[in-house]
Image (cartoon, helix red, strand yellow):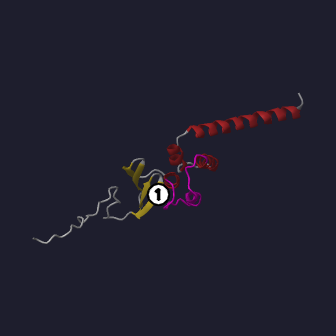
Amino acid sequence: MNINLKRNLFGLLISGLCLNSAMAEDSAISKMSNLDLCVNYSTLESDVLRESYFKELDLRGQLSHKDYERIPKKQVGTTSTMCGMYMALGKPLAEQSRQIRPMTFKSVHVYPDMYYVSQSGMIVEVYERKEGEMPPSLVVEKPTVEPPPVLYQAPK
């Protein structure tokens, strides 16, 4: 066999193996849940993997336009998605959720220096975590309401 033919066959074999492993990786990513992709993104060290996770989450509609700017800077703010928060900061220390209306959930996510409040997957409030201060409440206190006015009737 010709040496050039051997080189070409070897090159084809190697490129085929690389392509096969890349396709298997993409297949594994496409089978992962949204939450797993979002949380695992913060621990990835390979730029290639980060890019494929990011593309998959973008295809699934899990990111807001602000997430594109904030995730590389590891920042979170209002109008970020919950997925973007997980991607930028990783898993929180604690979370607590409450259903406030049908199909509407409100959650408080506790990080070492901040509290993030999300509602239906979007960050709606951001609070600095200070010693001696309570975290934001999931239960909104109802204000006291004055009774309705009653017509005064003079005694007869």
Residue 19 falls in image quadrant: top right
Q: Please tell me which residue lies in front, 35 or 121.
A: 121
Could one spot residue 93 in this view of the protein?
A: no
Question: x%, y% of residue 135?
Answer: 34, 60
Residue 112 vertical placement versus 59 (above, below): below
Instruction: Please tell me which residue is depicted at 23% across the width and 67% down the height of the picture.
Output: 149
Q: At numbered mark 1, what does the secondary structure look like: helix, strand or loop? A: strand
Q: Which residues are magenta?
A: 59-81
- Crowdedness near tag 1: few (<14), some (14–19) or many (≥20) residues, C-alpha within 10 Å: many
Residue 63 vertical placement versus 31 (above, below): below
Q: Is residue 72 magenta?
A: yes
Q: Is residue 52 left or right of residue 36?
A: right
Q: Is residue 144 magenta?
A: no
Q: Residue furthest top?
A: 1
What residue type is disc 1 on?
Answer: Ile
Q: Residue furthest right?
A: 2
Count all numbered tags in the image, as a single digit: 1
Question: x%, y% of residue 23?
Answer: 67, 37
Question: x%, y% of residue 94?
Answer: 38, 51
Query: In the rendered image, which quarter contains the N terminus?
Result: top right
Instruction: Please tell me which residue is depicted at 53% across the width and 59% down the height of the picture.
Output: 74
Residue matched to label 1: 123
Question: x%, y% of residue 126?
Answer: 43, 62
Q: Please tell me which residue lies in front, 69 or 111.
A: 69
Residue 128 falls in image quadrant: bottom left
Q: Is residue 150 left or right of residue 118?
A: left
Q: Residue furthest front?
A: 156
Could one spot residue 79 in this view of the protein?
A: yes
